[in-house]
Image (spheres, helix red, strand yellow):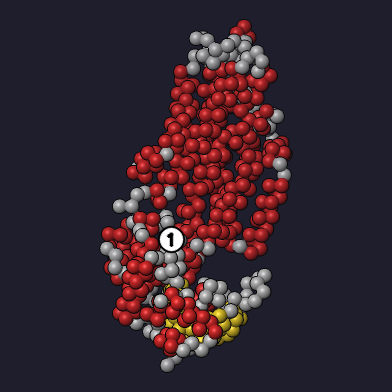
Amino acid sequence: MSALRLAMRRDPAGSLGALLVLLLLGFAMLGPLVAQHPPDAIALARRLQPPSALNWLGTDELGRDVFARLAHGAWPSLMAALLVVGTTVTLGTLLGAFSALLGGLADAVAMRIIDVLLAVPALVLAMALAAALGPSLVNALIALVVVRLPVFVRLARAQALVLRSRPFAEFARLAGAGRWHVLRHHLLPNLAGIMVVQGLMDVAAVILGAAALGFIGLGAQPPSPEWGGLVASGRHFMADAWWLSLFPGLALMLAALGFNLLGDLVRDVLDPRQEPAP
Amino acid sequence: MTALLAARDLRWQPAGAKAPIVDGVSLAISPGEFVGILGGSGCGKTSLSRMLAGLRRPDAGTLAWKGAAGSPPRGAVSFVFQDPFTSLNPRKPLWWSLTEAAALAAPLTAAARRSLADELLVQVGLPPDHATRFPHQLSGGQRQRIAIGRALATQPELLILDEPTSALDLSVQARILNLLLSLQASRNIAMVMVSHDIAVIRHMAHRVLVMDAGRIVESGEPTALLAAPRSTAGARLVANFLSADI
């Protein structure tokens, strides 16, 4: 806790990020409870109404309440992004660190596979995978994991290669430590900070990626109020109904900003070097 | 007397290098002996020390431990690295780093590890309450003491030190060197110290080996080297030392 307090004092921007993320999570949990309308209630008589006391953030082209849709879409949007990021960070760290530790042919083969995955444009690959698996949010998330994973494997491997040759890891090997010991005690604890930070910075990109897949019919399916989908559907009415894209866009922007700033704070908390000398 | 560690015709040339970094080095280290390896930058002394410790596999040549061909048994040889700032895992408390090698050699309970850590801290002149600290909370000299304590945890018979004081300021250097001398006297450990500093080697070593271009070009007592160097590299080291001394 002292590390957290110290990091928050040293990094006000990180504290702001933590606050934003807490607010977003609070909105995701409490928003649906305070919404005045169900998210899918169609009221064509009130279509494309601007923000008012009756509809706080206006209505969409079917007269559905934008606030209600935004609130009900918050939890699945944030959780889906965190699930993808959690999976890519965990798998990427383990695969990258193992690859660096094994070296030789296993490392070379793994890196060529990663090179192939990186060579294909991410969205095209995600589209191909999502189309092959079938249109659904879960399949879109699987596609996003596959697309984002190579970046994390590369990062983890590069860091692990540096750590592997640090004297503390060399000493462990000299003392008879096996690969598992070096991985568990010397590589993973020192990789954790940078990987978590990179993962948090990826949350917004994943939300947008899920939105892109949803937009072409390969992600969350209508009438699901997932945030990316709300931005995409609102773009047809930008000139007349700015609130349709603005509020989901603002929520996405705040999520991106919050998670990015939170990433810095988490790095400081995870790094024991931030503690003052006694 | 059988040599503790004997190396015969060690050779190592990294891929892409035009010449071997270590080129046919043979040497023997006796029990309790303090051997200094002197040489300028890039002469191959660090590479040689890493091969002696088993941290680098030679392209050619053999090692023998107490007369038997092959590498030393686990824990018999330990190593102290040059840079105290990267030699300890920043995420582990000092008690963990100090006792890692001992715990790898034989299963130890947490209490036994803490007790061993306290003992090692006292041996290297640090208070036991440092055990729960992290490396960033120590000075460079304190970190190097921890690295020395860590190297002693398995009670090695040979300790190899790669320029252990070059990253430290002068007053701290003297304290670390005196610590090493007292440890050697109390434990009778053989030590091999790599250095480019003839003054350090003169102070510490029973015997000095001068390296140049991957080869040992001179061997003898440090005082003899200072009085009458027999190689060009030795003469250069002595000349640099004398000019710095003036």
Quadrant assignment for the C terminus of chain B: bottom left
Which image quarter holds the N terminus of chain B?
A: bottom left
Circle 1 — which element? loop
Residue A20 image point, x, y percent: 46, 30
Tell me residue B112's x, y (percent). Answer: 31, 65
Where residue B210 appears, as percent x and y from the top left, is: 50, 82
Seen from this angle, which residue lies furthest front? Answer: B246
In percent of width and height, residue B49 lies at 50, 76
Instruction: Residue at 42% x, 56% y: name it.
Output: B90
Can residue A43 be seen here? no
- Residue appearing at x 43%, y 68% in the figure: B166
| Mark 1 chain | B
Quadrant assignment, res B151: bottom left
Question: Is B126 drawn above or below residue A116 in the view shown?
Answer: below
Q: Amino acid at mark 1?
A: Phe
Of A93 and B52, nearer the camera is B52
Q: Residue at x 59, y 62 (%)?
A: A102
Residue B120 vs residue B167: left or right? Answer: left
Outermost residue on the bottom side: it is B1
Q: In front: A168, or B221?
A: B221
Is residue B128 visible to us here? yes
Residue shown at 49%/14% (left/top)?
Answer: A36
Q: Kindly indicate the quadrant of the structure image that contains residue B193.
A: bottom left
Please state which of residues B46 and A79 is positioned toward the viewer in this rendering: B46
Label 1 sits on residue: B85
Task: Please determine whether, in this image, residue A208 is positioned above or below residue A145.
Answer: above
Q: Is residue A269 above or below residue A42?
A: below
Is B115 on the left or on the right of A74, as rendered? left
Residue placed farthest to the top in the image?
A: A45
Q: Residues within 10 Å of mark 1 (few under 14, many from 20)?
A: some
Instruction: Tell me how many marks there are.
Output: 1
